[in-house]
Amino acid sequence: MEILIASKLGGSAPLIVAAAVSGLAGLIVTWLVAAVAGPVIYADFAVFWALFFFMVSVLFGVQQEMARGVAAAEHAAGATASPWRRILAATGVVAAVVLVVLVLLGPSTLGSSWVAWSIPILVAVPCYVVVAAIQGALAGTDRWMDLALLLTVDAVLRLALTGVALWLGGGAAALGWATTLPILLTVAIGILRGGARLRSVRTDAVRARDFHWNTARAVFAGVGAAFFVAGFPAVLAVFAGSEAPAQFATLVLVITLTRAPLLMPLSAIQSLLVVRFTRLTTGRLIRAELLLLGVVSVIGLAGAALGAVIGPQLLTMLFGPEYVVTPGLVFVLVLGATAIAALYITGPGTLARHLHTAYSLGWAFAAVVAVACLALPLPLETRAVLALLVGPLCGVVIHLATQALSHRRAAVTPQTPDDDRKENR
């Protein structure tokens, strides 16, 4: 699937390789902690991992908007502006927000070791604002080799440091820093690698207000993306009630594994999709999205059938006899991952058309519907499946419908690119 996307959209082989390496490294980290530390410790680590990457995934909107703005600036008829001073200001705001969130939620979500878990998060998450901006700038200027390098280094470092942390005993502080330290190192590598070329990039948002407003809406959409992917185990923990730790750990592990083949590569090439979609007319864009949605659907159905056949036995063989799951659950969870993957296609398409509000609304409404599903008086597994299926599909409908309406308006009343951008903002 990734190779098809790359070829159809003028893609980048290094980025595809980096996506594969990143996905494999994440799976190995999951296997190491779950198999070596056991279900109880893995359940605690999974909540920390979910909280940390929830915050990181929210900030992925910075990368999305940076990539779009830099790519659009290449063809902008008007003035452009450097984004870096605004990015650095944003890190201070993010640090303050993260501190408040950790103080309010840390004791209830991270347990008695919440301070040891929280300090690495507080240091690393604001740094990710800079990482996301660097990655977005690299994507917007088609520097896929450099972007692939950053993605690969981050994933490989996290895997290596996790192994060291487990060798040292797998305590909260060791696992926490093993997970977050690669982000700090990626900042340094990105700056050294980018140099003067990074400082020279410009975005199409000249006014600070426009830049911050566009970025804020992309970040807001990131809340929805983070809800379904990185943060879903933490959200699920809120609704788990009296669910046994081993059963909860098994459900979280299966959700993580069933989504990895689709979502890890797609999340890694989001900026590629934004940049390529930005350069397509609306009609060609919708056709490209529908083609990719068809490919993802076919792969998802095949993966669901295969997962139902071999998934339960493979889970027990790789992680131990404590992890038991039914074929039916594996099947529907792969379908849920496919629904989220569809949002990972329509989201960049909507953002590429400068429909920032619709982009955010699609993700937000999907998350609201998912929360409503989790609140139903049903078994936890059923609620989780409904949340992962129904919520994302609602978001996909909003994205595609908005793009179609925008295309129809443009056909009826032709506008200049500048006029269209002002209207959509």
Image (cartoon, rainbow, N blue to C red):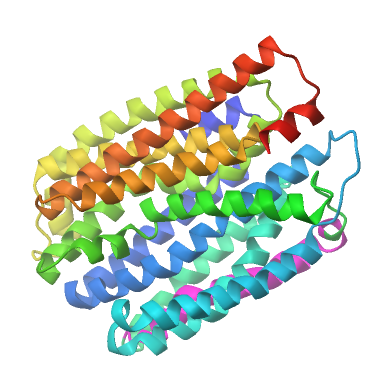
**In this view, 123 is above or below 304:** below
Front in this rendered view, residue 50 or 16:
50
The residue positioned farthest toward the top in the image shown: 412
**In this view, 267 is above or below 332:** below
236 is within the stretch colored magenta: no
Residue 267 located left or right of residue 78: left
Front in this rendered view, residue 225 or 323:
225
Residue 290 located left or right of residue 128: left
- Residue 11 visible in this rendered orientation of the protein: no
Residue shown at 29%/72% (left/top)?
Answer: 33
From the top left corner, tell me how far across and down residue 296 is, in percent: 39, 30
From the top left corner, tell me how far across and down residue 303 is, in percent: 27, 35
Residue 278 located left or right of residue 166: right
Q: Which residues are magenta?
A: 170-198
Front in this rendered view, residue 293 or 322:
293
The quarter of the rendered structure image containing the C terminus is top right
Q: Main secondary structure of the magenta part?
A: helix
From the top left corner, tell me how far across and down residue 205 is, in percent: 79, 47
Residue 58 located left or right of residue 390: right
Residue shown at 56%/43% (left/top)?
Answer: 270
Residue shown at 37%/80% (left/top)?
Answer: 106
- Residue 130 visible in this rendered orientation of the protein: yes
**In this view, 387 is above or below 104:** above
From the top left corner, tell me how far across and down residue 82 is, in percent: 85, 56
Displayed quadrant of residue 236: bottom left
Residue shown at 40%/89% (left/top)?
Answer: 115
Q: How many marks?
A: 0
184 is within the stretch colored magenta: yes
